[in-house]
Amino acid sequence: MTHKAIFKPLLKGIVPIVPPIARGDSLVNKTGSWRYVRPVYRNKLPPCNHSCPANEDIQGYLSLIKQGRFLQAWELIRRSNPFPAVLGRVCAHPCELACNRRRFDEAIVIHNVERFLGDYGLTLPGERKIRDRRGEKIAVIGSGPAGLSCAYHLAKMGYPVTVFEALSVPGGMLAVGIPEYCLPKEVLTAEINAVERLGIDIQTNVAIGSKQSLDDLLGQGYKAIFIATGAHKSMKLGLSGEEKDGTVDALSFLREVNLGNRGSVGDKVAVIGENNVAVNAARVAIRLGAKYVSIICRQSKMDMPTRNEEVKLAEEEGVHIIYLAAPSNILGEGRVAGLECIRMRLGEADKGQVPRLTPIKGSEFVIDVDTIITAVGRTPDLNFVNHELKTSPMGTLVVDAGTLATNKPDIFAGGDVTGGRTTVARAIGDGMRASVSIDRYIRGEGLEVFREKTPIAGFKDLNLAYFQSSLGAQISRLPVADRIKGFTEVEGGFTESVAIKETERCFSCGVCDGCDNCWLVCPDVTISRKNGEYQVNYDYCKGCGLCVEECPRGAITMEEEAKWRR
Amino acid sequence: MTSLLAEQEKFIVPEEEYIYQGHTLCAGCSAALIIRYVLKVLGPKTICVVPACCFTLMSGRAAFGPDSQLTMPSGLRVSVLNCAFETAAVTASGVKAGLEAQGDYETTVLAVAGDGGTFDIGLQALSGAAERNDDIMYLCYDNEAYMNTGIQRSSATPDGCWTTTTPLPRPKQGAKKNIMEIIAAHKVPYAATATPAFPLDLMQKVSKAKQKRGTKFFHVLCPCPTGWRFSPEFTIKISRMAVESKVFPLYEIEDGEKYTINYLPRGVSVRQYLELQGRFRHLLTEQHIARIQENVDHNWERLVRRV
Amino acid sequence: MEKVISGNYAAAYGAKLARPKFIACYPITPQTTIIEKLADFCSAGELEAKFIPVESEHSAMAACIGAANTGVRTFTATSSQGLALMHELLFWAAGARLPIVMSNVHRTLAPPTNLGADQTDSFAQRDTGWIQLECESAQEILDSILQAYRIAEEVMLPCMVCHDAFYLSHTYEPVDIPEAELVDSYLPPYVPPFKLDSENRLTFYASSTRCPATQYEFRYHAQQAMERVPTVLRKADEHFYELFGRRYGIVEEYYLDGAELVIVAAGTMVSTIRRVVEEFRQRGERVGLLRIRMFRPFPKEEIRQLLKGVPKVAVFDRNISLGEGGILCQGIKSALYNVDKKPVVFGFIVGLCGVDITLDIVGDIVDYTLQQDSPEKDIIWTEVVM
């Protein structure tokens, strides 16, 4: 009979003596059962990427350049933007404003790195025509950044594309609106040629509307049309005397200069306007020999809607900017003899509104000028469009903001012709978005708008303890005396070593860059690396959150365990 | 040596791990991090001597395994000798002597004790071993109280701190015992402070100490989420703040004479360190902070003068 | 080789012949000459051991535990206060199953400080799990240390060899110090059944709070080991006799034939009691003596066998467990409880705190006991002779 309370030894020890010594490791304890939150590797959206109207994966190519992988960086940028050498020179770089590093010391000088990448790309043999070509022909009207970008992306998808350009040169505003000291002709031509090599047919001197209409094109077998004719019509001042000799609108002025007809300006030039076009016109005037150039700007200095550097460069070159002044009368008989202006006052700001500008009565003053260049806005020329396409009261084409479709299913539009923010980057982005929509339309799939759901990596997501302060790389510029002699490019680019060093400053906000911090700070050794990817062993992770807190770039998020256990 | 990224150029972190997953230390425990880094450098020819303290949770608990085998699921990938609370240093000395008597001069004997087992009850054994310059490495992980037994005060508890045996309104009186000065007075070949927020600094120091013979002493700050009252993800942030606010400077003392400060702190206010921890909540007044800041600055000046 | 040496030196020679690899020690009168002698041996190179003079007895035992775990033979020595300080670690050493051998000199426990002989110090450690041997002569100390290693290393329990302060530690007697080669054949090098090293990853003594049943079993096995000691001791003793011609057994019978009264005692007082027993026998009184040599494990079998049917037993305790009485007496009574025809047991406190035990005192106690039918009290305090 066995008695329950009588002891029978159980242990078979490692030695017959049975001391309290044993083997064993703690892997038997699945401490993963402790946690109620778990770390998940989830890349956030870097703010630079989010802010780029051309949808560039900026963080991506900065990271590749840092590793010296220029070819991959170039291939990456060309998934969105076929004109990095151009954009690196002309873009207003909202990415640098959004850059989180700005709040730490200085933003990454992204545009110069993009320029470096574009210039590098120009040394490559470039992309070739796609082998598997589709049958559906697409027509693009306008060879500006929007049109060429759309053509480029469609060509990469295999579509045969014809681009119709009214002017004698392709490029749109890039060719005829942006002065060469900012965007050298060789660079633009090289990048356009690189795009053409994909099998795009660019027909210059063909204005749609006069000989062929949109319907004609469709009748010719084009399955879809992308309208990207831009906004090349200057708005009028609305002052009498606008037709006097010596008055010219800035767009025409810049176009002529860019096309090689370097006319002359007088000695005393006044540019009316406050946007980039005005500043460009002023700086061109200086280079053409004008002795005294001023910009009459309605806004105050703070509110002037131009790239800050542009204003500074203009002032260095001798341009005088008169703020808070508006033109009231153009003086002179038959020829411009002077410009009368009136001072403006910045009124009280209504709640949430921009402060109102009101003229100060009796504050008129006269500037002695012989040339007036007007840059008070531009609108699209929609004469070629028939009444079937919906237009807005401002004279732009109405499109769906996401799909870029017009009210006609086979016609799409983008860029300045649709109004909105009239930047080159946005135009390039529109070109890509339209190409996606056109492709879906051709293939009979519904047009769909991709909505970004990834949270943006904010400044507070970073752990700054792992970064040392360092200022951005210096941008070299020609001395003023050399600048105004001619149209040589003012800004210099980065050398390879400078570019790489600049990319090393990138925080890689929200995107894991393999720094190994998470692996190093886990007290439970649950994070492992395999092929550059990190994995958490959830059998053991206790959910302490150290990896999340110590990730310098906020690429890991804590999520509720309950959500995962469901 | 400054931030993690900068140090990476100088020191390659060894890949091999010598702790296992599944150990039962608290989530976010600094001691786990500390021993992980230390063992990475010391490697497999190490024996840990562990007295009764929080760290015994790392060395596992006896249990019946499958088919009645005795098992002790230790989280350490090296041999461990658990010993009586106050005997860490001298047991380590005995182990080292026993190994050397059998011709093994390579194995590092590492005593791992908490602040209680070092500053208080273990001080006799540590002082004896240090005076004899026994060839052991001693790692004191300082969580500034008797944490394993329930957050009671020790002589490593900072002045004015709440603990369960010094509850409000009478928090702990008296400055934290300066164990580094005590050890330095024994003229040991190497003594150093470290924290888990500067892992490469810690690893470089262990690597340096490994080359020396004699007693090597490490005083490592070990923020404890459970006892210091903070959410576990801030363990490293608090270690960093302790250094940046000069509360816990990183320095080495060689042969009791040569002082080297390893990192010049940014000099943030002590407030930034105190306000992260619940145990100091009652000290967040202007008066207290001024007094504490004064003491911290004074101690820092003293240290700088010794260099 | 015969030499006239003190008891302490005999202990030192015994330790030297056993070839320990590690000695940790802390000085306390009257043990000091043991460790001084060992220090001499080590520095002269006669004994190849790591000799560490530590900063307290507690640390001495801790260091021995550390070294013993790595698989080397260890030795230490102490007395009264030092032994009391080690108390915590005596449990440790036994629970860890380490064959540490320690020489303890019986000395009174303070307060106040007193260097005189008293058995309370080691008897108070009877619960710790150490094997305890009591010595009567310097020769026995040396021999017991050698036997202690044999026994300890076979059952894997620590062993202390005890002798009285000054009466034995500092008095000189002729001692045969055996040849090293002969001792080596009796006591080969220690082969540990487990060792701590960096080759085989093992965990030693992890906490058993979560599974107390494991520790329950460790205690069980430790007790089993204790219960094997008498057999192992006898074998070791016999082998010792074959090589060296001396043996001591578990207990020693002296004039037990037909004894009416048996005195039970341990330590140097036994030498005095022998004279008194001889005297009484000459007078025709049937008095006998049972010397306890192995105090732990307590020799219950021998006591039951040898004291069954004896009318009276007088236990001489040079110790006291306050609130209970003489410790030896307690053990004797407990061993005899279930014996039919058990003797009447008289418990005497003699020679406590170093008070001298003279022939007259012993004689007096024997007279008294022979006259009494039963003890008046549980504890009989003897008169002190100034």
Image (spheres, rainbow, N blue to C red):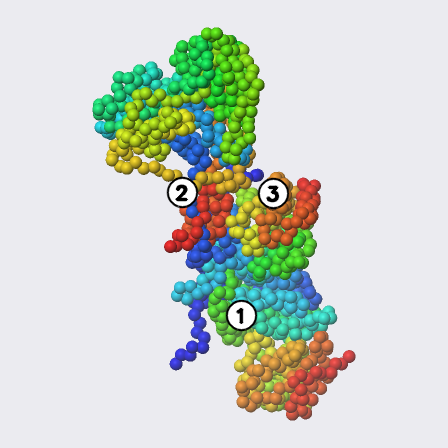
Q: Position of residue C80 (x, y in %)?
A: 67, 69
Q: Residue furthest right?
A: C386
Q: Nearer the viewer, residue C154 or A307?
A: A307
Q: Which residue is tagged 2?
A: A533
Asked whether disc 3 touches disc 2, contact meaning CB atoms under 8 Å apart, the reply is no
Q: Which residue is mark 1?
A: C151
Chain for disc number 1? C
Tell me which amino acid carries mark 3. Glu
The image shows residue C217 at horizontal and vertical percentages of 48, 70
Q: How many numbered circles does the render carry?
A: 3
Report x, y in % for residue A527: 44, 47
Q: In what quadrant of the picture does the N terminus of chain C appear?
A: bottom right
Q: CA distance from mark 1 to mark 2?
A: 60 Å
Q: Viewer-nearest of labels 3 and 2?
A: 3
Q: Inspect the image, locate mark 1, and give the three-letter code of the amino acid beneath it.
A: Ile
Label 3 to label 2: alpha-carbon separation = 32 Å
In this rendering, the answer to whether C135 lies above or below A547 is below
The quarter of the displayed image where residue A4 is located: bottom left
| Callout 3 secondary element | helix
- Dots 1 and 2: beta carbons under 8 Å? no
- Whether residue B155 can be seen here: yes
Q: Which residue is mark 3?
A: B244
Q: Which kind of residue does numbered mark 2 sit on? A: Glu
